[in-house]
Image (tube, rainbow, N blue to C red):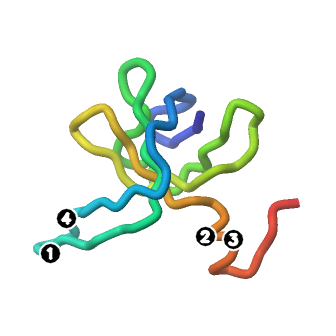
Amino acid sequence: MKYGRTTGLTFGFLIAINATIKILIGNSYVLFENQIVIERDGDKFSDRGDSGSLILDSERRAIGLLFTGSETRVSFANPIYEILSYFSVDII
């Protein structure tokens, strides 16, 4: 689940971890590795403006940060442990 600025509270299903995806940024494709893939449950899991939303599992533990969606039924997130490690911070 996540709460985004645009779509509010939405629910989805984790369908892949450690995924490698190509995202078009500007005029070039950028490769992202070790990503989380979430399939929506209902209309949309995410939309423009939801980037950066914290994604929680069913026990309300942080698992990732939303960074993009697609025209299909999936959204993509960076694993939370990668974010925490990069910034040398912990969730308390």
**Marks 1, 2: nearer the viewer:** 2
Residue at far right of view: 92
Disc 3 from disc 1: Cα separation: 27 Å
Residue at image position (58%, 37%) is: 3
Disc 4 from disc 2: Cα separation: 22 Å
Residue at far left of view: 27
Q: Which residue is mark 4?
A: 24
Label 3 close to label 2 by CB (< 8 Å): yes
Q: Which residue is mark 3?
A: 84
Residue at far top of view: 42
Q: Secondary structure at mark 4?
A: strand
Q: Residue 32, how many percent across, how many down?
A: 36, 68
Q: Residue 59, how many percent across, how many down?
A: 77, 33
Residue 40, compared with residue 4, is above or below; it is above
Residue 54, compared with residue 22, is above or below; it is above
Q: Which residue is mark 1?
A: 28
Q: Residue 64, how many percent across, how many down?
A: 59, 53
How crowded is the residue under tag 3: few (<14 C-alpha within 10 Å), some, or many (20+)?
few
For the N terminus, the image quarter is top right
Q: Which residue is mark 2?
A: 82
For the C terminus, the image quarter is bottom right
Q: Secondary structure at mark 2?
A: helix
> What's under tag 4, amino acid-wise?
Leu
> What's under tag 3, amino acid-wise?
Leu
How crowded is the residue under tag 2: few (<14 C-alpha within 10 Å), some, or many (20+)?
some
Residue at image position (63%, 60%) is: 80
> What's under tag 1, amino acid-wise?
Ser
Disc 4 from disc 3: Cα separation: 25 Å
Residue at image position (67%, 37%) is: 57
Name the N-terminal-most of marks 3 and 1: 1
Name the N-terminal-most of marks 1 and 2: 1
Query: Which of the 4 image quadrants contains residue 21?
Result: bottom left
